[in-house]
Image (cartoon, grey):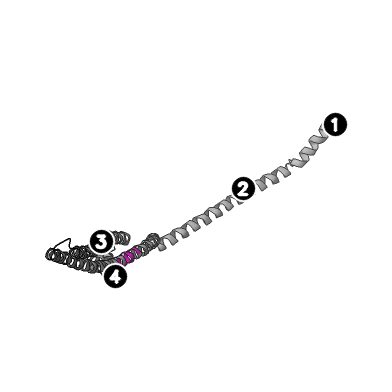
Amino acid sequence: MNLFTRLFKIGQAEAHSAVNQLEDPIKLTEQALRDLRQDLDKALHALAEVKALAIRSRNEAETGRAQALEYEGKAVQLLQKSGRQELAPAEADRLATEALTKKAQHEAHAIRAAQEQEKFEASARQLDENVQQLKQTISQWDNELRTLKARVTVSAATKTINQQLAQLDSSGTVALLERMKEKVATEEALAESYGQIAQESKSIDQEIDRALGKDGSSQAATELQALKAKLGL
């Protein structure tokens, strides 16, 4: 399994087409990560099975070697009994031969099991490397996904702002601002002219009052004198 040729669906022709069609890159990346995690689960399951086979082969090899030693020991005991004349020599030879045949069978089985153990352990090592590589890749792309989400958020906001700016009618907006400035200037000039008119009206009234002797300060002084005389001051 070449991980670098199938890391993501985004690396497949269909995914490239989807990216070109402006599909959501976040969803594509998340789907690719889900696929990687499924691959990791399968790899872990396969690793466990191969390790189990290696353990079983190791146990069978140990059992075969132990049984071979046991049958060798039985052959020795049979010959010893024959030497002590506790068993007929011909019978002892026959049974000892059978025991040695069993010994050879168990030794052969132990050798096969040991060879299978080596093969399974080699496969387990390769699978374990794949598992570690998958874990590292998933961790790397988890970080990449967080970065990608942040970049998508920024780019989406920038795109929205730029679209709004692009849709603005610049000439119309400037014309509107010029009209508003002109209107404010007109209102200010109108307010100033009304103030001048009011001031002119007030000045004429004061001139008339002075001509008629209705100056406010003189009348107040006269009333003050009258009040002092009334109080005997």
Sequence-earlier tag: 1 or 2 = 2
| Amino acid residing under circle 1 | Ala
Q: Alpha-carbon neighbours of circle 2 within 10 Å: few (<14), some, or many (≥20)?
A: few
Q: Position of residue 3 (x, y in %)?
A: 28, 68
Calculate the distance from the C-alpha at mark 1 to the C-alpha at mark 2. 40 Å
Q: Give the spatial CA distance, label 4 vs label 3.
A: 37 Å
Which numbered marker is on residue 4?
4
For disc 2, the marked residue is 198
Marks 2 and 4, how far apart at CA? 89 Å
Of pointers 3 and 1, the one earlier in the residue sequence: 3
Left-right relation of 187 to 208? left
Q: CA distance from mark 3 to mark 2?
A: 117 Å
The amino acid type of the residue labelled 4 equals: Phe
Which residue in the structure is indicated by mark 3?
A: 59
Residue 182 x %, y %: 50, 58
Q: Element type at marker 3?
A: helix
- For the record, the magenta segment spans 129-135
Sequence-first disc among 2 and 4? 4
User: Can residue 69 be seen at all in this image of the molecule?
Assistant: yes
Tell me the residue at 27%/69% (across/down).
Answer: 122
Q: Label 1, on which residue? A: 229
Q: Quadrant of the C terminus?
A: top right
Q: Secondary structure at mark 2?
A: helix
Q: Is residue 130 magenta?
A: yes
The mark lying in front, picked from 3 and 2, is 3
Mark 4 Cα shell of 10 Å, populated few (<14), some (14-19), many (≥20): few
In the image, which is nearer the foreground, mark 4 or mark 3?
3
Q: Amino acid at mark 2?
A: Ala
Instruction: Report helix, strand or loop for mark 1.
Output: helix
